[in-house]
Amino acid sequence: MFQIKRCITLSLIIIVGITTLFVVNAIGQTRVDNATSNDVKTWLFMDTNQARNAAKKAHADILAPRNFGEAMTLYNEAKADFQDGKNLEDIQKKLRTSNSYFQKAIDATKLADVAFPNSMKARLDAQYTESARFSARLWTEAEKKFNEAAVELEDGDVSDARKKADQAEKLYRQAELDAIKANYLDETRELLNQAEQLGVKNDAPETLKLAQQLVEQAELELNKNRYDTDVARSLAMQANYQASHAIYLANVIRKMKDTNQSWEELILGSERPLKRIAEKTDQTALFNTGFGKTTDEIIAYIDTYQDSVYGLKQDLDWTALELKLLRKRNAELEQKLGGKARENSALARQITKQAKTRELFTNVEQSFQREDASVLWDGGTILIRLVGLNFTSAEATIHQQSYRILTKLRNAINSFPDGTVIVSGHTDSYGSDEQNWQLSQKRAEAVKQYILDNTDFNVYQIEAIGYGETRPIASNETESGRAANRRVEVVIHPWKMTEENL
């Protein structure tokens, strides 16, 4: 029978109270008591579950299939062994090996981001247009090539990996093109035929005309830019929507005519949905001056709610990290390293440093207003998304009105003099991949130069990277989404990477 020691530690975080940790000493090969089996399994698989989730989040199953597959094989074997009551030391050994494979897979995904970002984006675009459904043969061929490229990259053959990734990109783009034509344009033409038969042009002529214009523009874009389908896809989707919208409007207008509905009844009816939304947000919907006031109040409520959600997520991230450190520290203290608890151990110093980092992060977060930047804690780094930093279209010159935000950025970076900084530039999907990459790189370089000119950081502490359109944070199908994707982000690694920080 396994002996279980129960250890109680006090968490530093509000959310977490008293955490009970179970340490299992494996002696021989026996079964874990049913009453504690779930607790032991949670403890035993905790680190590996975290590593697996991180690998999935990085899409390692796609970008690093070999290492991810090895990791999952060992992980599943460990689960089966635990279920069968096998030796815990052997299970732990498999889990440690599984962890190392998950980490290798994550590292490989980072290399894939650099080695073939365009093919990765082409794959996402093809997925978005349901190419697997509307162009199954090309999609299957593209997936095969992409998988081969990922395996080549894991083996260290970057040259062959890029060649196969380029082949996959062309196949994805062709599959996407076929899917756009089949999924959007063909369906839109059918809707336009229906609209003509229903006489929609008599009741919703402007909307119908817009749909027809969008179809023509989409076809022109598809023929002109075969391998840059972002604009064409967006136009095709808008055309599809406007065609069905025209049919809907025509039906509503005809019902109004048939029932002799007044303009007053129409306007009052249009107020009801907004009123229902306002009620859910504890707002009083008032329309005596139009829709504007109530709309603004609802948007303000949503913004506040989102800030609250972000704040809770940040707290949970800090909690997870600090609990991990506390568990390690607890185990260290129990083992009485060297016969005496080392109060000034590397782990103790790391816990102190982590508390200091959180304090500094809070100060940085509070220094920016919502319209200036979003400040996020992202797995050990501080991410500052400069939403208020604007550039003239197709240019990379920093204007004077942006200095206020950049001054706050300077102060934030100066809070971490021993850290390192990565400045990344991003664009929306409109325009060619090469043009977007060059523009994003120039904008990242411009912000990097500002940091070098206004802080004590040296060139070795700051890196500028342009990602072009490959890392969107919002939909490129809407103007607001494209505006969000046109951004510069600054990632601060708070401390020098030393062994105790790993």
Image: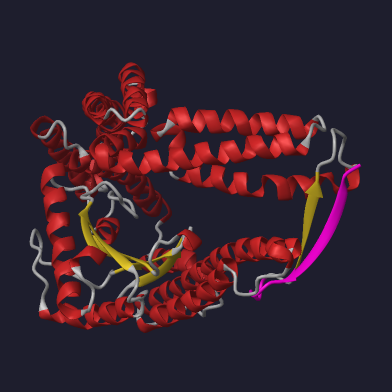
- Vertical side of 141 occupied by 243: above or below: below
- Residue 365 lies, in percent from the top left, at 41, 77
**Could you say which quadrant of the image residue 141 lies in?**
top left
Which residue sits at x=68%, y=72%?
Answer: 11
- Residue 388 lies, in percent from the top left, at 25, 73
Q: How many marks?
A: 0
- Residue 420 lies, in percent from the top left, at 31, 66
Q: Along the line of sight, which residue is nearer the eye, 295 or 473?
A: 473
- Vertical side of 433 occupied by 78: above or below: above
Left or right: 101, with 125 as reference point? right
- Vertical side of 173 occupied by 385: above or below: below
Quarter of the figure with the N terminus:
top right
Residue 78 makes an appearance in the image: yes
- Residue 216 lies, in percent from the top left, at 13, 36
> Residue pushed farthest top?
137
Which residue sits at x=86%, y=48%?
Answer: 36
Which residue sits at x=15%, y=81%?
Answer: 401
Residue 23 part of the magenta-drawn span: no
Left or right: 58, with 187 as reference point? right
Left or right: 287, with 282 as reference point? left
Q: Along the line of sight, which residue is nearer the eye, 127 or 464?
A: 464
Residue 13 part of the magenta-drawn span: yes
**Colour scheme shown:** secondary structure
Residue 426 makes an appearance in the image: no
Numbered range of the magenta stretch: 1-15
Q: Along the line of sight, which residue is nearer the eye, 142 or 105?
A: 105
Q: Along the line of sight, which residue is nearer the eye, 75 or 131?
A: 75
